Image (cartoon, helix red, strand yellow):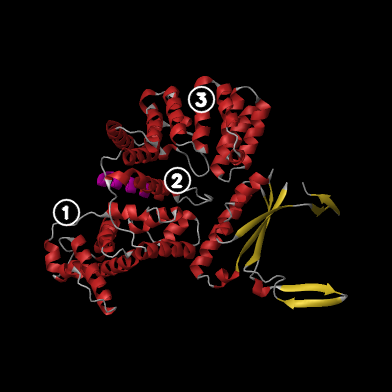
Amino acid sequence: MTEDTAARAEDLARTAYGRLLAIIAAKDGDIELAEDCLADAFAQALHSWPEAGVPGNPEAWLLTVARNRRHDIHRSAAHRLSDPIDDLARGGAMIAQELDPDAIPDRRLALLFVCAHPAIDPAVRTPLMLQAVLGFHADAIARAFAIPPAAMAQRLVRAKRRIRDARIPFVVPERGVMSDRLTPVLEAIYGAYAIDFPLVAGIEPRDSLAAESHYLATTLVELLPDEPEALGLAALLSLSLARRPARGTIDEFVPLHEQDTSLWDAGLIALGERYLHHARALGGMGRFQLEAAMQSVHCARALSGVTDWRALQTLHAALVSVAPTLGARVAHAAAVGRVEGAHAGLEILDSITEEAAQRFQPAWATRAGLLAEAGRVAEAVRAYERARSLTTDHATRRYLERQRERLHG
Amino acid sequence: MRYALLIHYPQPAVSTLTEDDRKAGMAAFHAYAKALDDAGVLLSAEVLQTVASATSVSVKQGKLQVQDGPFADTKEAFAGIFMLEVPDLDAALAWAEKCPAAGWGTVEIRPSAVRYVDGAWTNAS
């Protein structure tokens, strides 16, 4: 019975945490205080539910207890301000239990915009979302980002105090500024998926956060159903996650074109395709939709058995024009190499002259592959060696070694 | 080419570490050393005790001076060294940025000049 209740509370913590926190914190912008009150409410639930039974509407119960707690804190701190929400809360748990669960508003969208507000340091936006929306403990976030727990906790506290003290509003931006304000939200959600984990030796935290990133993206789409780029991000993450089971182990990296398509998750692919379809119908092309479209082309191999490289080349060229990052340009060179031959691919690679490319492992791995195809074996071997020396990831290094050994064989 | 990754971090941070912080730090250093070793680039690794345990020695005008404490009292103190054998500075940089200490201190990369091997000083590269 106790175990059952604990499991129930845990389950609620996962699904309802962000919803409840968004409501409590929106009142005065104090996320830290809201977290404390919510933690108290969960603790009280674990204490009283095993005996009294799980209330009919557990979310409303937790919300009421958390609000009462905040009210007590405010009162003990000699706050005598009138607080209509707390007045409602004083009505007690009886009323709360009668509340319709759907009547509890979902303010998580405003909370997401707060976490990725332009006034918040970009480096802390993703951790802040993981904590405020998903209830992640600072220690777990610190592990994922490979930062000492004390340092991560300090960054989070600083960001939360900034939100409170600078009075960053808990609102969904108006239509006119929506696209500008949405981009950092999308990037922060994507950030949880794309963390460049400093090390993977023996630890693989990326799986768990990839799932959380996907959850945030699909939540965002539920709350903001007609934003093409939000749909694009949800599609991108669905389609990328679908291929995860085929991506190899921490010792062995299996590149996309060698993956066994029967290991891909058909349900996630279908979900991703639905998001992408909806985004296309809305119009307006953006970075995430383009990347999702590329994933879609790759996933199509599960059915057709072939990869449409021409379509990929077009998409890569479009991505370079929208978001000309180093990674996008290198990937474009690889796609051109596939379609128009190694020489054309190398020409594009050579046109990337910025210094950072010299230290960018994918640029060297791509160059090595193209050189090998062009029959320039000695240069290819050197490029593979260069790529390998820049790689700190075990599985990737093994893969590059295998590629280089093939040239000798 | 042989490179030294010289790790510096603030000493107060060490003294205020909790047991959990210390464990997490050790786990991170363990994973890092293992990754370097697996990649075949690690020559040696050593993390030192705090500067509180340092003793500095110098001989000035023929007179031995033993000083209780570090050679230089700075906010960020020398805390450890990783010796690597990698092709070039870019490879050393790739590893240095993954060093756990880069998150709470500074990692200085210094190429080795000469080293003593088989009874003679030899160019390190």
Circles 2, 3 touching at the beta carbon (< 8 Å): no
Element at label 2: loop
Q: Residue furthest front?
A: A176
The amino acid marked with disc number 3 is: Val
How far apart are the alpha carbons under marks 2 and 3? 25 Å
Q: Residue furthest right?
A: B62
Image quarter where the C terminus of chain A lies is top right
Res A368 quadrant in image: top right
Q: Main secondary structure of the magenta part?
A: helix
Residue A11 shows in the view: no
Residue A152 shows in the view: yes
How far apart are the alpha carbons under marks 1 and 2? 34 Å
The amino acid marked with disc number 1 is: Asp
Q: Chain of mark 2?
A: A
Residue shown at 41% from the left, 54% from the top: A125
Residue shown at 48% from the left, 30% from the top: A258
Magenta range: A212-223
The amino acid marked with disc number 2 is: Ala
Q: List the residue tagged with mark 2.
A: A194
Q: Are marks 1 and 2 on the same chain?
A: yes
B81 with respect to A22 (left or right)? right
Precedes in sequence: disc 1 or disc 2: 1
A398 with respect to A4 (left or right)? right
Q: Residues within 10 Å of mark 3 (few under 14, many from 20)?
A: many
Circles 3, 1 touching at the beta carbon (< 8 Å): no
Q: Residues within 10 Å of mark 1 (few under 14, many from 20)?
A: few
Q: Chain of mark 3?
A: A
Viewer-side residue, B37 vs B76: B76
Task: Using the image, tell me which numbered label, if any, was put on residue A102.
Answer: 1
Q: List the residue tagged with mark 3.
A: A336
Image coords of residue A54 (percent x, y)? 19, 64
How far apart are the alpha carbons under marks 3 and 1? 51 Å
